[in-house]
Amino acid sequence: MDFTEDDIAQLSMIPLMGGQMSRKDKIKEGIFIAKEEHNDMADKVMAMLYTLVDKFLDGAELDEIKEAMTMTRLGQMIEKDGREKERIALNTLNKKLLSSNRIEDCIKATEDEEYQKKLMKEFGIK
């Protein structure tokens, strides 16, 4: 769906209108809708929603909207790649520790992140 200027005006006004949804939820839904598009109009919708967030929300509501805003498709892809690299590194570490019969080190590495980093450095795992 391509946004028109009328769509932008309507979407940006929805958080200001009455209804059963909270203002935060209206803004959040607007963000999700706008994030599906990848064009200049969608960017304008997001900019208007950012302004509403800044004007009307604070505290925990602001944190929730911030999370929704930062989880763009690109952000999700980057986060997924990072998790995959971390998973591979941890599996590699576990395999090396287990094949070396270092069971206690393997157990300790699951409980102590600093120790885990030390072991990864020892094995040259990045």
Image (cartoon, rainbow, N blue to C red):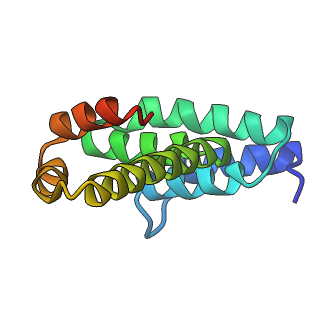
Give the residue drawn at x 45%, y 58%: 25
Across and down, in percent, residue 88 comes to: 47, 52
User: Which quadrant would residue 106 be assigned to in this image?
Assistant: bottom left
Q: Height in image: 43 above or below 106? A: above
Q: Height in image: 66 above or below 1? A: above
Give the residue drawn at x 86%, y 42%: 5
Name the foreground residue: 32 vs 106: 106
User: Which quadrant would residue 44 be assigned to in this image?
Assistant: top right
- The quarter of the picture where the N terminus appears is bottom right
Across and down, in percent, residue 37 comes to: 79, 50
Across and down, in percent, residue 111 comes to: 12, 51
> Horizontally, is 2 left or right of 44 in the view?
right
Give the residue drawn at x 59%, y 39%: 49
Residue located farthest toward the bottom when viewing the structure as drawn: 20
- The quarter of the picture where the C terminus appears is top left
User: Which quadrant would residue 32 be assigned to in this image?
Assistant: bottom right
Give the residue drawn at x 77%, y 42%: 42
Name the foreground residue: 22 vs 29: 29
